[in-house]
Amino acid sequence: MKKAKKIPILKNEDEERTFWKNSDAADYVDWNASEKVVFSNLKPTTKTISLRLPEYILDELKLLAHKQDVPYQSLIKIFLKDRIDQELRQG
């Protein structure tokens, strides 16, 4: 594998744009020195679903969410995730 080129010192954003427009970024990466990185705080991909709930359950969820100062949809996700984790631990 060939050695990565050194990125030149660029004076401003315009010069940087021109440089990268005319350069292949792969020539400036040393893949042997790369490390695997986990981006744990990235927002996961979501999928919209339709869920029918009795009104009293939704009212109770909204009440609990208000007490915890979170949106009720977020509280539903928290509850679901907690229960899924519990079920998976029990195997």
Image (spheres, rainbow, N blue to C red):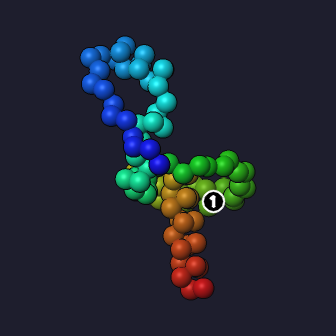
Decide if residue 12 is on the left or right side of residue 70. Answer: left
Nearer to us in this view, 2 or 6? 2
Q: Residue at x 57, y 65 (%)?
A: 80
Callout 1 amino acid: Tyr
- Count neighbours of disc 1 (C-alpha within 10 A) and say few if under 14, some if 14 to 19, many if 20 or more: few
Q: Is residue 88 above or below residue 51?
A: below
Where, by quadrant of the figure, is residue 16 drawn? top left
Q: Residue at x 50, y 61 (%)?
A: 78
Q: Is residue 76 above or below residue 42?
A: below
Where, by quadrant of the figure, is residue 5 drawn? top left
Nearer to us in this view, 37 or 1? 1
Q: Residue at x 45, y 36 (%)?
A: 27
- Would you say residue 67 is visible in this rendering? no
| Quarter placement of the C terminus | bottom right
Decide if residue 29 is on the left or right side of residue 75. Answer: left
Nearer to us in this view, 68 or 81? 81
Q: Residue furthest bottom?
A: 90
Mark 1, secondary structure of its residue: helix
Q: Is residue 25 above or below residue 40?
A: above
Residue under label 1, please give it. 56
